[in-house]
C-alpha cells in the first residue's frame, strides 16, 4: 500500500502472468528440484499463510515465484475450511507469525506478538461487554495463537 510495485502484494490484476513475492491459492505447482533445494513447506497451521515463508525461501535461493494467469483449477467448494465461519482465521495468523519469526529480529517479533496480545485482548473485552459469545471464542483463539507464538 505504501510502496506499491508490480507483484509486491496479493493485490495485482490477475489477468496476466507475473512474478510475485507470494500468493495464496488452492493449487501451487513447484519444481521438485526447487523443493529439494529449499525443503518442504513448514506445516505450522491447518490452513493458510505458511506459503509466505516458503516462497521467500525459494526467492532467497534464486527461484522465481510466478502467478500464472493462463491456468485454471477447479476447486470443489473449500473442502479444507468453511468460509462462512471465522473459525479458520486464527490458523492464518499461525502461518503469518511463523513467517515473521523466521524473517525478523527476535525483538521485533516479540514486540509484534505483544501488540497482537493487546489488540486481541481488547477485542475479547469488547466481545464480553457485548455478550457476543462467537466473538469471545474467536478472540480467545487469536489470543492463544499470539501467546503461544510469543512463548515459542
Image (spheres, rainbow, N blue to C red):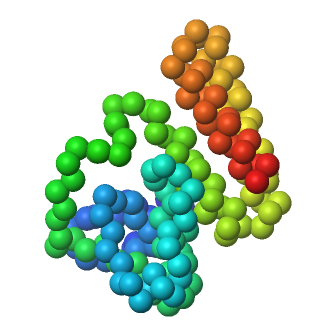
Across and down, in percent, residue 85 comes to 39, 30
Q: Does 19 sit above or below residue 127?
A: below
User: What residue is at 62 percent from the left and 36 percent from the top?
Assistant: 142
Q: Is residue 28 visible?
A: yes
User: What residue is at 64 percent from the left and 19 percent from the top?
Assistant: 126
Q: Does 124 sit above or below residue 26?
A: above
Across and down, in percent, residue 83 comes to 34, 37
Q: Is residue 113 visible?
A: no
Across and down, in percent, residue 24 comes to 39, 60
User: What residue is at 69 percent from the left and 27 percent from the top?
Assistant: 122
Q: Does 145 sit above or below residue 25?
A: above
Q: Nearer the viewer, residue 44 or 103?
A: 44
Across and down, in percent, residue 110 comes to 79, 53
Report the label total.
0
Quarter holding residue 71: bottom left
Q: Does 123 sit above or below residue 92?
A: above
User: What residue is at 74 percent from the left and 41 percent from the top?
Assistant: 147
Left or right side of 77 for 97 = right
Left or right side of 25 for 141 = right
Position of the C terminus, as image quadrant, is bottom right
Left or right side of 92 for 80 = left
Q: Nearer the viewer, residue 109 or 18?
A: 109
Quarter holding residue 131: top right
Amino acid at each position: 500500500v505504501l510502496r506499491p510495485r508490480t507483484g509486491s502484494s496479493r493485490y495485482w490484476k490477475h489477468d496476466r502472468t507475473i512474478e510475485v513475492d507470494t500468493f495464496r491459492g488452492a493449487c501451487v505447482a513447484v519444481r521438485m528440484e526447487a523443493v529439494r533445494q529449499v525443503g518442504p513447506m513448514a506445516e505450522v497451521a491447518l490452513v493458510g499463510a505458511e506459503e509466505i515463508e516458503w516462497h521467500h525461501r525459494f526467492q532467497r535461493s534464486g527461484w522465481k515465484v510466478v502467478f500464472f494467469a493462463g491456468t485454471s483449477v477447479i476447486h470443489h467448494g473449500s473442502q479444507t475450511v468453511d468460509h462462512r465461519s471465522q473459525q479458520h482465521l486464527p490458523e492464518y495468523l499461525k502461518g503469518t507469525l511463523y513467517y515473521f519469526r523466521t524473517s525478523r529480529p527476535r525483538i521485533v517479533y516479540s514486540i509484534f506478538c505483544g501488540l497482537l496480545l493487546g489488540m486481541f485482548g481488547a477485542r475479547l473485552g469488547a466481545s464480553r461487554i457485548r455478550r457476543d459469545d462467537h466473538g469471545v471464542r474467536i478472540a480467545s483463539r487469536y489470543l492463544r495463537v499470539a501467546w503461544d507464538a510469543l512463548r515459542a
